[in-house]
Each structure stands twice: as C-alpha cells, then as structure tokens.
Image (cartoon, rainbow, N blue to C red):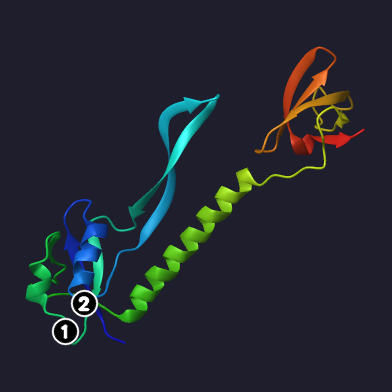
Amino acid sequence: MSAWYVVLTGAQQEITTVWRLHLLGLEMFTPVLRRRIRTGRVHKGRNITRLVVRPMFPSYGFVRQGPGCNTDAILGVHGVRDFLRNEHGQIATLPHEAVLAIHAKQQQELEAFIAASRRGRHFHSNLRVGQRVRVDDGGIYSGLVATVDRIDARGRIDVLFGLIRHTLPIDMVAAA
C-alpha cells in the first residue's frame, strides 16, 4: 500500500479541503470525532444540545500518494497551506499502517459515542405510573412504600410518599 502525505490545512478547513482534493481525483482522509455540546438553551427544563463533528487533528489531513498525485497541484488547492516536513525541509510521509491505526481509533471513538448516546435514550422498565413500589436504596427512604408518579427516559422515577414527591434512580425501587 502507498504511503500518505500529511497536509496542513487552513483553520477549520479540514472537511471542505477533503472535497476539493476529491475533485482532483485524490484521496484525503480527515478523521473526525462526534460530540454533543450544550447550546445554552433550555426547553421544558432540559438543556438543549447539538451534535458537532470536529477533526481529530485540527488543521491536518492525510492524502494518499498515488500515480496522479502531484504535490504542486495539492498545494494549489484552496484550503491547503503546506505539507508536514521533516527537519531537512522534505515532505514527510506516513506508512499506510499508521493511517489504518488512526482510522481504527476513529471507529473506536464513534462506537463509544453511539453507546453513550443509547444509554440515556433507550431506558425500559417494567414499572408503570400508579404502581406501588418499595424503595431499596439503603438511605433514609429505604423500606418505604410509595406510588410511581412519573418515569422518564433517563432512568429516573418520581415517587409519591403520601403528599411528598421525591425523585430517585429507577434501580433503587422494586415492585411492592
């Protein structure tokens, strides 16, 4: 397999530069990470977040060497600043195995992000609103019987102790 050049891109131009180099028939790889960030807004008592895609290596990308790979043409593409160079000023290259390792790390990060996203959204319980439950948290409510008032998708439950409402993690209660 052919080696890869490390390309220095303009600030926040990694993704758009990929498309410009693809138009030249070149293969560029820019590993990205997905993150949820808070927007600062609140809707119905919950923080609003949005999904953002950020480069794993800001201002860097990898271009595969090939028969039609002209370094002068790459430098002429809008968004490309230069190549990563060694101490002698020569263009540095990465072996294909190193880029495969970076790709594997990107996939690992993606799988972790997906798993973390699923944890909070797909919570299922056999409890129902109105059902009587016993609190087993080992705290001050331990052993008390309450009524389920509300269950949310994040694994929290509102229980009523007579007129007193309290929120607990759902794994702290058992059907009475």
x and y percentages locating residue 41 in the rendered image: 43, 27
Mark carried by residue 25: 2
Q: Residue at x 34, y 63 (%)?
A: 31
Can you see residue 52? yes
Mark count: 2
Q: In the depicted view, which residue is nearer to us: 1 or 77?
A: 77
Q: Is residue 145 above or below residue 82?
A: above
Quadrant position of the N terminus in the picture: bottom left
x and y percentages locating residue 160 in the rendered image: 81, 20
Disc number lying in front (1 or 2): 2
Q: Residue at x 12, y 61 (%)?
A: 78
Q: Is residue 87 above or below residue 160?
A: below
Give the structural element (helix, strand or loop) at label 1: loop
Amino acid type, mark 2: Gly
Amino acid type, mark 1: Gly
x and y percentages locating residue 104 in the rendered image: 44, 70
x and y percentages locating residue 49 in the rendered image: 46, 37
Can you see residue 88? no
Q: Are marks 1 and 2 in contact (CB under 8 Å)?
A: yes
Which residue has dot 1 on it? 68
